[in-house]
Image: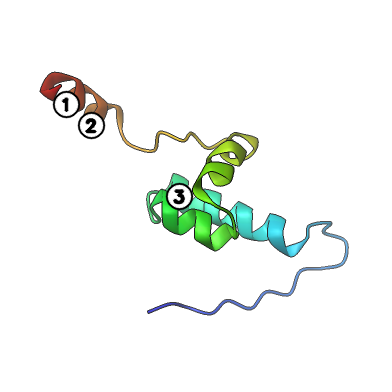
């Protein structure tokens, strides 16, 4: 199931559709609402390109809590 979103962006906002989709995908990924692959697809990019562009939006590629990292290190 997917949702359709229709936005009216004022002409004064200088952003094109691909940029807008990347912004949305980056935020949904950062919030943990989309996995990397799904976010990349939403942005219209492959995973590698999406990962490379996340920094521009202040989003880390490593999107899980420090507590998960600590547990992963203990289990390694």
Disc 1 to disc 3, how far (Cα)?
22 Å
* Mark identifier at residue 71: 1
Residue highlighted by disc 3? 29
In the displayed structure, 45 sits above or below 67; it is below
Q: Residue 14, percent across and down?
A: 84, 56
The answer to which of 7 and 29 lies nearer the viewer is 29
First in sequence, mark 1 or 3: give its number.
3
Which sits in the foreground, 51 or 9?
Answer: 51
Residue sitting at x 67%, y 74%:
7
Circle on res. 68: 2
* Element type at mark 2: helix
Label 3 to label 2: alpha-carbon separation: 17 Å
Residue 22, horizontal then vertical, whole percent: 62, 54
Which quarter shows the C terminus? top left
* Colour setting: rainbow
Evaluate if marks 1 and 3 touch, with contact meaning CB atoms under 8 Å apart.
no
10 Å neighbourhood of mark 1: few (<14), some, or many (≥20)? few
- Rendering coords of residue 3 (x, y %): 47, 78
The residue at 59%/34% (across/down) is 55
Q: Is residue 11 above or below residue 1?
A: above
Q: Give the class, few, some or many, for how many residues have Cα within 10 Å of label 2's Cα (few <14, many ≥20).
A: few
Residue at image position (88%, 61%) is: 12
């Amino acid at each position: 199931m997917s949702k359709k979103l229709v936005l009216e962006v004022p002409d004064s906002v200088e952003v094109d559709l691909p940029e807008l989709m990347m912004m949305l995908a980056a935020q949904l990924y950062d919030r943990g609402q989309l996995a990397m692959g799904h976010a990349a697809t939403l942005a219209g990019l492959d995973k590698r390109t999406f990962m490379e562009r996340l920094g521009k939006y202040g989003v880390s590629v490593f999107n899980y809590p420090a507590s998960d990292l600590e547990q992963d290190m203990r289990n390694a």
